[in-house]
Amino acid sequence: MADKQISEELKEQISKLERPNIAVIGGTGVGKSSLINAVFGKELAKTGAGLPVTQEFCRYPGDEYSENVPIFIYDSAGYEAEKEKEFVEGVLNFLSNKKKEGVDKQIHLVWYVINASSGRVQEFEKKIVDNINQKGIPAIIILSQCDRAKEEEIDGIKAALEKFNLSKVYDVLKVAASPLEVKGKRICDPFGLEELVNKTVELLPDMYTDALIAAQIVDLRAKRPVVWKYISIAAGTCFAAQASPVPVGTPALIAAQTGLCMSIASVYGYREVGEFLVTIGSITAFNAFLTAAIGDLIGVLLPGAGLATAGGSASYVVVFGLTCNAVFEKLAHNNLQGSNKEEIKQYLRDSFRKEFEKYSLLRISSPEALEIMKKTFLDS
């Protein structure tokens, strides 16, 4: 049955989502936590959430089997004055030991964070970055808190990086993850985060990029190719199986719908429909929500759609997938904190209905039509 195949195909695809390991290294007060939270969500690097893995590093998320964030961040502890030697030894030992653990456990990328206001790069930092290079680990040098730094301070760091020949080896990015507030107003908007995400995707091995894109919250449009992968798998299965009629409301189709929706939700940071499921109350209520939202719309919005054909089933799957994507994009854009569960539930119900209606006239009659839809979706 096509709907069962869709669920299995999606499960297989999600299981292939390889988690990258990123080490964030830098001294005390350089803004590592603010940077991590700005890129991956404000709750990731909250106090007490990390798991200490060595004296120098803790890991986010702390739960190795957590599916909420498909990435591991290893955050270095800061160093105290006159204890730079111990810091260097701890960092280098950590990187070496992780490499011995194999491809899946080793560090795949380093963010080396320097406070832009410091105006300098210290000799021991050069030693760390040189060692990272010798180990063949891609790295990005991040000048943090640039909103608070003077131009001459930033120029001083750039000059030091050039002197140490580091700027020839690594990309150097200026970032303000959490700009300074004066009288309750930020002195500028955050900047440099999208460039950081794009460069991270570029430098990571290909097998880890989908997980990074799903984990980051900076560039929502970057998530669309991953979302389309799930939609196309589900729709392509309809053509491969010459799918039978779409039985809206049956347990099998609800499972397939939920599988697709959960897959898309994971790309926006709502794994297992996360916050979405919390607002609905339970999986039973969520299924009832989907059935109610779709059951009363399918006859009105898809009259004569030919759902008994593979093209009809694929059309329905694409409409459903694009609708879920639009809803989760909205959810990611809008701050619904402070709203009660009923308000959020109604917001989601209204959004689903509106977006489903918008996409309801789409027809996917062949795999070729699916490719055309892909370009339209990614370019829109």
Image (cartoon, rainbow, N blue to C red):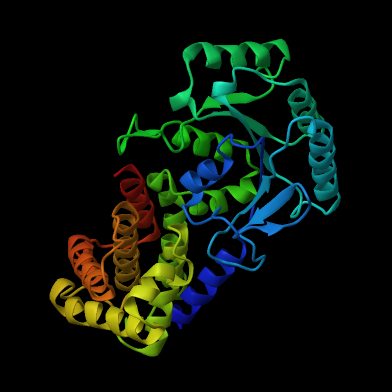
Q: Position of residue 331 (x, y in %)?
A: 31, 59
Res 289 → quadrant? bottom left
Q: Residue at x 16, y 72 (%)?
A: 301
Between 95 and 9, the one lying in front of the other is: 95
Taking the image as shown, residue 316 lies to the left or right of residue 367, namely left
Number of numbered discs? 0
Between 163 and 257, the one lying in front of the other is: 163
Q: Position of residue 30 (x, y in %)?
A: 58, 34
281 w.r.t. 130: above or below: below
Quadrant of the image for the C terminus?
top left
Res 255 → quadrant? bottom left
Between 314 and 160, the one lying in front of the other is: 160
Taking the image as shown, residue 75 lies to the left or right of residue 184, namely right
In the rendered image, the residue lying farthest to the left is 300
Q: Residue at x 48, y 21 (%)?
A: 149
In this view of the protein, can residue 242 be seen by the observer? no
In this view of the protein, can residue 165 be seen by the observer? yes
Q: Position of residue 377 (x, y in %)?
A: 33, 50
Q: Residue at x 76, y 46 (%)?
A: 56
Q: Position of residue 287 (x, y in %)?
A: 34, 83
Taking the image as shown, residue 3 lies to the left or right of residue 189, namely right
120 w.r.t. 67: above or below: above
Res 308 → quadrant? bottom left
